[in-house]
Image (spheres, rainbow, N blue to C red):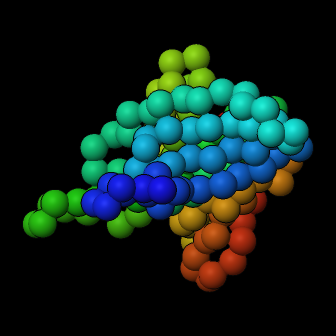
Amino acid sequence: MIAPGVADPAGESFLAASKDRVGFYSARASAYVELSLSGDVLGVWKTTPPPRIIITGIAVTPSGAVFLSAHRQYKSGEATPEWQLPLYRLDKSSSALVQLPQDALSIPDGPIRPMLLLGTDGDELVFYSKPPASLSWFAVR
């Protein structure tokens, strides 16, 4: 039972599965937990997200790499870019969320803009993209 006034760590959380593991990221607890398919805890990583970042999705590749998409909050009156996709990789050795450069995804030229990380298909990341609204698969370079 959670005490009154205490935020549930399952709120603002994301669940992802791969061929041999399940990952859970709690934005409220700033922690990633990985379980084997038999329920054994493989690891717990306490992260420190960058300021003004809201995690929007998570994916775990078959090799165990963990990626997180995010939305950046802007202050009132602050100029906002037309499009920006903060994409992070969890460095399990340091528990750091490492921002990937904007060209880290193999995005073809054109109007496709990844918006929300949904999961993986093999080693490719699957995003909800627009315009037009669709699913898109991108390899990480």
Q: Quadrant of residue 91?
A: top right
Closest to the observer: 130 or 50? 50
Give the x, y percent position of residue 3. 36, 55
Closest to the observer: 40 or 24? 40
Q: Quadrant of the C terminus?
A: top right
Q: Quadrant of residue 90?
A: top right
Give the x, y percent position of residue 32. 57, 38
Q: Residue at x 63, y 47 (%)?
A: 24
Residue 111, compared with residue 97, is above or below; it is: below
Give the x, y percent position of residue 127. 66, 63
Residue 19 seen by the camera:
yes
Is 73 placed left or right of 34 in the picture?
left
Is 136 placed left or right of 29 in the picture?
right
Give the x, y percent position of residue 122. 86, 47
Q: Residue at x 38, y 34 (%)?
A: 48
Q: Quadrant of residue 113?
A: bottom right
Q: Residue at x 35, y 66 (%)?
A: 82
Is 71 placed left or right of 123 in the picture?
left
